[in-house]
Each structure stands twice: as C-alpha cells, then as structure tokens.
C-alpha cells in the first residue's frame, strides 16, 4: 500500500483552515498530521514530519510561514493573499537554494474562478473597456482581493500595446473610479451576507460581456486545495496560480 501524504494545516481555526482540515481528513490518500493556529510554534511541522503545508492565515504572517516550510524541505500550498511581486521574487530566490521543494500560491482555489480569470484574459484584447468588481464578506482584511489583483494582471498582460480604455472623467472623488491595477479599474464591495464574488465587465460600442463567478462558501475552494496538495510535491519551484497545475489551453 502506498504511504499517505503527511499534511499540516496552518490557520486551522479560520474559515478556510477549518474547511481544509475536514477536506484532508476525508481524503483517503492524505493524513492530517497537524492543525495549527496562531499560538502554535512552527516547529510542530518538523515534529509531525509534515510533507505538505496548507497555509491559510493572514497576509502579515504568510511569508514567514512559507519561508520556514521551504527552509525545512516542506512543500507549501498557499491560499493567503498579499503575495506581491517582491515577496514572490524573494521566495523564488529561497527556492533556488532548495531545488527539491515546491510551492503553490493560489489567489483563488475555486475552479470556476480560475476558469473565469482565464476566460477574461482571453477576452481582454477584443474589447475597448474593462473593469473589475469584486464583492466579499465584510470580515475580509485586504482590498482589492487577491483574485482581482491576479485577474487584472492577466488582463493587463493580454492588452499590452492596445489603447487605454476610453474615460472622459475629469473630476472624481477619491476612489470613485476604483483602484487602478496595472491600468485596470478594480472596485471592491464589502457587504454583509456576501461571501466571495467577482464580475469582470468588458465593453465595446453596442455590446457588453460579463464574466461572473460566485463562491457561496469554503466548500468551493476545497477541490482546488486538494489538487494543489497532490501536485505540489512533483512541481519544484514557485507556481503562482492554480491554473499552473491545470490544463486550460
Ligand atoms: N486562495 C483562495 O482560494 C482563498 C484564499 N483566502 C485567503 O485565505 C486567508 C484566510 O482566509 P479566512 O480563512 O477566510 O480567514 P480567517 O480570518 O477566518 O482565518 C485566518 C486564521 O489564521 C490565523 N492566524 C493568523 N495569524 C497566524 C499565524 N501567524 N500563524 C497561524 N495562524 C494564524 C487566525 O487566528 C485565523 O484563525 C485570507 O488571506 C483570505 O483572503 C480565502 C478564501 C479562499
Ligand atoms: O478572503 C476571502 O474570503 C477570499 N480571499 C481570496 C481573494 O482575496 O481573492 C479568494 C476569495 O476571493 C475569498
């Protein structure tokens, strides 16, 4: 019988962490060896001989947690937001010193969301205008969402060399036109009753394309988390975005 993959969850008391603990416990090929919270020392990962860390904490602590894992030869599947390009570059440099270790940073684990961002990148060059609206529960600490940042970056790459979207705004209250992410306006809504939603609006003369994805709960992310855990051990280096593990072409 093949041995089960030894998995630890960090941020296990949080919304995503609790769901990840249950998903790992249910998976027959995985063994949950640690469910750790803020007050647990990271050395528990070593004592429990974890092979893969699922990291679902807060933007301020994620980088140090992942670096600890990599330095100790533990693969990491990271859902926490806040991984800008400087942090990614620094992690890539660390991974170069640990060439056997894999890290997946996934701004969104929901397969529908990954597909919607990929469709948005495909559509981007065919329309004059594009704006992103992301809508989340009011407990979310970051804005814009990691998913919106990633989607805007993919769209901006696809629109390189094209004219800027038409916009005659001359006077606006601060924030009225959203945050510009690589030139793409991103609007963040925080509303009681919502969970995690995003709409990408494309417009040209006489037509509109809307690409909307809705996550209604943590269950939407778990199939993607499990794909990450099962794949990361055979993908050394840094992969940014679950699309890197899927065949979307
Ligand atoms: N990639 C994806 O598909 C998804 C990503 N997220 C992101 O995942 C992160 C967690 O989201 P939620 O579970 O909704 O938040 P949450 O606030 O419910 O949970 C965060 C947990 O992390 C714990 N924590 C804080 N600092 C820690 C530390 N240094 N070590 C260990 N644990 C620590 C907190 O005590 C809390 O239990 C956020 O950045 C969120 O944006 C959320 C949903 C989906
Ligand atoms: O905080 C959340 O809830 C979510 N965070 C991720 C993000 O910032 O994109 C993924 C999803 O939107 C839920």
Image: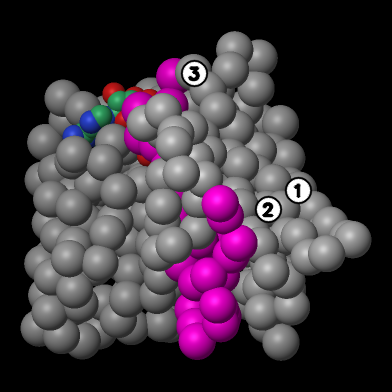
The residue closer to the viewer here, 59 or 219, is 59
CB under 8 Å between discs 2 and 1: yes
Please tell me which of labels 1 and 3 falls first in the chain.
3
In this view, the mark in front (2 or 1): 2
The residue closer to the viewer here, 101 or 131, is 131
Residue 142 forms part of the magenta stretch:
yes
Residue at 16 percent across and 25 percent down: it is 39
The disc at residue 138 is 3
Q: Visible in this render: residue 108?
A: no
In percent of width and height, residue 209 lies at 82, 59
Please tell me which of labels 3 and 2 falls first in the chain.
3
Residue beneath disc 2: 200
In percent of width and height, residue 15 lies at 48, 27
The disc at residue 125 is none
Q: Crowding at label 3, few (<14), some or many (≥20) Cα neighbours within 10 Å?
A: few
In percent of width and height, residue 219 lies at 67, 38
Q: Is residue 233 above or below residue 138?
A: below
The disc at residue 212 is 1
- Residue 68 placement: quadrant: bottom left
Q: Is residue 218 above or below residue 66?
A: above
Residue at 33 percent across and 69 percent down: it is 103
């Amino acid at each position: 019988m093949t041995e089960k993959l030894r998995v630890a969850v960090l941020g296990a008391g949080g919304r995503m962490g609790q769901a990840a603990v249950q998903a790992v416990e249910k998976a027959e090929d995985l063994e949950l060896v640690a469910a750790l919270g803020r007050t647990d020392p990271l050395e528990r990962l070593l004592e429990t001989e974890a092979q893969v860390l699922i990291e679902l904490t807060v933007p301020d602590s994620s980088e140090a947690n992942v670096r600890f894992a990599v330095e100790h030869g533990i693969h990491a599947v990271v859902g926490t937001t806040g991984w800008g390009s400087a942090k990614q570059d620094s992690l890539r440099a660390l991974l170069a010193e640990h060439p056997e270790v894999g890290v997946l940073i996934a701004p969104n684990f929901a397969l529908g969301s990954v597909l919607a961002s990929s469709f948005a990148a495909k559509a981007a060059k065919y329309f004059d205008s594009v704006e992103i609206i992301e809508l989340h529960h009011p407990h979310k600490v970051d804005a814009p969402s990691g998913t919106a940042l990633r989607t805007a970056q993919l769209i901006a790459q696809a629109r390189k060399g094209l004219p800027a979207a038409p916009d005659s705004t001359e006077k606006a209250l601060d924030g009225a036109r959203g945050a510009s992410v690589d030139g793409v306006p991103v609007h963040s809504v925080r509303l009681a009753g919502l969970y995690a939603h995003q709409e990408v609006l494309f417009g040209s003369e006489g037509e509109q394309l809307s690409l909307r994805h809705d996550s209604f709960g943590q269950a939407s992310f778990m199939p993607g988390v499990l794909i990450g855990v099962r794949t990361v051990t055979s993908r050394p280096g840094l992969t940014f975005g679950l699309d890197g593990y899927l065949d979307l072409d």
